Amino acid sequence: MLRLASGSPRRIELVSLLGIPFEAVEPGIDESAHEDPAIAKAEACHVPGEVTLGADTLIDLDGERIGKPADAEDAKRMLRLLAGRDHVVRTSVMVIGAAGRRLRFAVRSRVRTREPDDARIEAYVATGEPLGKAGAYAIQGAGADLITGYDGCYANIVGLPICHAYFALRRMGVVAATMPEPAFAARFGFECPAYRCAYAQGRALRDGAEYASWSERV
């Protein structure tokens, strides 16, 4: 059995694409108290004999780390800060095997946003969607209206680099019913432009490594 150390509907949906039986467990930790919440989440939920997957997504804006907004006003602040600027979405992933073996890595994607538009930001925040989202937007939702483009793994921006996670889970003996890209395309309606790079990086995963998902470098 796979334990997903997350209550995030986005991560639950992404893991569901693999057709793997799993249980989503809310870690119940204070993310701000940990340097890498993905590790803390996985450790909090791990049970010997089962495989655990934890993940945490942050925004890197010119070296400044941006997490989830505290409230609607904080969401507006974040979106104004991101507006008209490129940023990196970084997801840290921690997998703990049934016997305690560990594999930790991180995946990055680049995102480009529209020029500042207070009316657009106000309307988006009023939907309530930004709350609970790193950087205060959901690229797979109404937040796509704030985005002009991206490079690399789309699923990583949503909250979990599913291709990389697929290969990490295989190393721990968890074999998915399907490869991730066909399931992703069926769900989102398009082929992720970075999946070939993600497959190559996933096959070569190294503990402690970080991957630019728009690059072929492994």
Image (spheres, grey):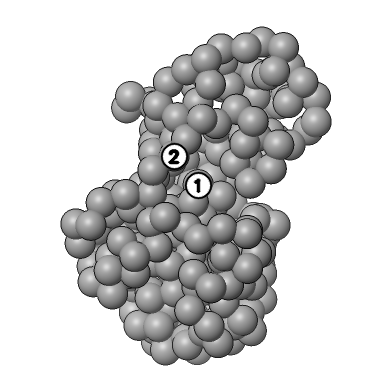
Q: Which quarter of the rendered picture does the N terminus lie within?
A: bottom right
Residue at x 63%, y 46% (from the top left corner): 140
Which is more toward the observer, 116 or 196?
196
Residue at x 56%, y 12% (from the top left corner): 116
Q: Is residue 13 above or below residue 109?
A: below
Q: Is residue 214 left or right of residue 40?
A: left
Pointers 1 and 2 in contact (C-beta within 8 Å): yes
Identify the mark at residue 157; answer none if there is no mark. 1
Which residue matches tag 2? 150
Of badges 1 and 2, nearer the viewer stands: 2
Q: Please, what secondary structure does the residue beneath circle 1 have?
A: helix
Q: Is residue 115 left or right of residue 89?
A: right
Q: Which quarter of the rendered picture does the C terminus lie within?
A: bottom left
Question: Callout 2 environment at 10 Å: few (<14), some (14 to 19), or many (20+)?
Answer: some
- What amino acid is at disc 2? Tyr
Residue at x 72%, y 12% (from the top left corner): 119
Residue farthest to the right, as pictured: 127
Q: Please, what secondary structure does the residue beneath circle 2 have?
A: strand
The x and y percentages for residue 196 are 34, 65
Q: Is residue 108 left or right of residue 17?
A: left
